[in-house]
C-alpha cells in the first residue's frame, strides 16, 4: 500500500500473470477437411442401395392400392351382372305354369327331338297352361364356348329370338324340389311316365308336375383376364394375374324361387 493513500496499489504485470488475468483462452482445434477427389466407389454404392431400398418400400406400399383401384370398377360390373341375371330368372320363374322343364323347348333345336329331357344348366317355363294352343315359353341356358371365350346366360323365347342376358357367366345350375321340400333326383325327372303319351312330340315326364321350388346357382367372372389368377377354387377360367393383390375372384349367388302358380294349393 502507498503511504498516504487509502486504496490498494494496482498489481504489477507479474502479479496479473500469476492470477491468470490476461492469459489467452485455449480453444479446441477445428479441423476442416476439404476433398478435391469427390466420393469413393463404396460410398456411391451404399447411397445407391439405400435409395433403391426406399423406392422399393414406397412401391410396395402403393402397388396393393393400385391393384384395388383397378379392380373396383370391374367388381361393380360383376355385381351388376349378378343382379341382372337374378332379376331376369326370378321374373319368369315366379310366373311359371306347369310344367317346369329342365331342357330346351320351342321351335328351334328342341331337346326332346334329340331325346334329351334333362340339362343341369337349362330351364324352360311356360307362361300359360300347357293345354293352351298357343304356348309361350321362356328358356334360360348357359352358353359356354371356351375356344371363343364366350360365357353367357341366354334367353330363348321359343320362337326366333335367342339373345344373351348376361355376359361372363361361368356357372348356371338348377335344382328342383317337391312339395315335401325334398330335392328331386334328376333321374326321376327324365325316365317317364310321359305326358300326354310317349309318342307326343311335346311330351314331358309326369314327375315334372311335382316341382314346387327351383334353386338357382349363378356365377360370374371378371371380364378382364388381368384380374383373374390360375383356374381353381377362386376362378373357373384362369387369367393372367400374377399378384394376389390384383385377384378378383368369381362371384357366385344361390337363390330359391317358388313359382306362384305351382303353390296355389299350399
Image (cartoon, rainbow, N blue to C red):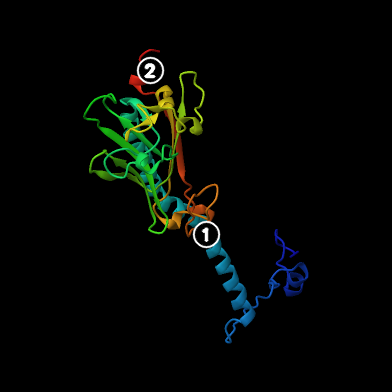
Task: From this view, report whether residue 10 is shown above or below residue 100.
Answer: below
The quarter in which the N terminus is drawn is bottom right
Task: From this view, report whether residue 220 is shown above or below residue 225.
Answer: above
- Can the viewer see residue 42 in this picture? yes
| SS class, disc 2 | loop
**Image x and y of residue 144, in percent:** 40, 50
Nearer to us in this view, 55 or 159: 159
Q: Identify the residue at horizontal 23%, vertical 40% (top origin).
A: 159
Do the residues bearing badges 1 and 2 touch, measured as CB atoms within 8 Å? no
In primary-sequence order, the first of circles 1 and 2 is 1
Residue 163 location, quadrant: top left
Which residue position is annotated with label 2?
263
Outermost residue, right side: 18
Q: Identify the residue at horizontal 25%, vertical 30% (top origin).
A: 135
Residues packed near mark 1 inside 10 Å, few (<14), some (14 to 19) or many (20 plus): few
Nearer to us in this view, 140 or 100: 100
Outermost residue, top side: 265
Residues packed near mark 2 inside 10 Å, few (<14), some (14 to 19) or many (20 plus): few
Residue 95 location, quadrant: top left
Outermost residue, front side: 199
Nearer to us in this view, 78 or 237: 237
- Can the viewer see residue 80 in this picture? no
Which residue position is annotated with label 1?
242
Residue 207 location, quadrant: top left
Task: From this view, report whether residue 168 is shown above or below residue 4.
Answer: above
Q: Left of 263 or right of it: where is 236? A: right
C-alpha distance separating marks 1 and 2: 50 Å
Q: Nearer the viewer, mark 1 or mark 2?
A: 2
Amino acid at each position: 500500500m502507498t503511504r498516504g493513500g487509502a486504496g490498494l496499489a494496482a498489481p504489477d504485470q507479474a502479479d496479473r500473470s500469476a492470477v491468470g488475468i490476461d492469459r489467452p483462452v485455449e480453444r479446441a482445434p477445428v479441423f476442416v477437411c476439404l476433398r478435391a477427389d469427390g466420393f469413393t466407389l463404396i460410398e456411391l454404392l451404399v447411397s445407391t442401395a439405400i435409395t433403391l431400398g426406399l423406392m422399393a418400400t414406397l412401391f410396395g406400399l402403393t402397388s396393393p392400392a393400385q391393384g384395388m383401384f383397378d379392380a373396383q370398377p370391374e367388381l361393380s360390373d360383376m355385381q351388376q351382372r349378378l343382379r341382372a341375371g337374378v332379376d331376369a330368372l326370378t321374373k319368369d320363374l315366379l310366373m311359371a305354369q306347369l310344367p317346369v322343364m329342365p331342357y330346351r323347348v320351342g321351335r328351334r333345336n328342341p331337346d326332346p327331338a334329340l331325346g334329351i329331357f334333362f340339362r343341369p344348366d337349362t330351364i324352360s317355363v311356360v307362361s300359360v297352361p300347357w293345354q293352351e294352343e298357343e304356348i309361350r315359353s321362356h328358356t334360360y341356358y348357359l352358353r359356354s364356348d371356351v375356344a371363343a371365350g364366350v360365357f353367357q346366360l341366354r334367353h330363348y323365347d321359343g320362337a326366333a329370338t335367342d339373345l344373351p342376358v348376361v355376359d361372363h357367366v361361368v356357372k348356371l345350375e338348377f335344382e328342383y324340389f317337391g312339395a315335401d321340400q325334398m330335392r328331386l333326383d334328376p333321374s326321376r325327372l327324365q325316365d317317364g311316365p310321359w305326358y300326354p303319351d310317349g309318342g307326343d312330340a311335346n311330351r314331358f315326364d309326369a314327375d315334372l308336375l311335382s316341382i314346387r321350388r327351383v334353386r338357382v346357382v349363378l356365377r360370374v367372372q371378371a371380364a378382364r383376364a388381368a384380374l383373374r389368377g390360375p383356374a381353381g377354387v377362386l376362378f373357373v377360367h384362369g387369367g393372367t394375374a400374377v399378384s394376389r393383390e390384383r385377384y378378383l375372384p368369381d362371384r357366385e349367388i344361390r337363390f330359391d324361387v317358388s313359382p306362384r302358380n305351382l303353390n296355389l294349393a299350399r
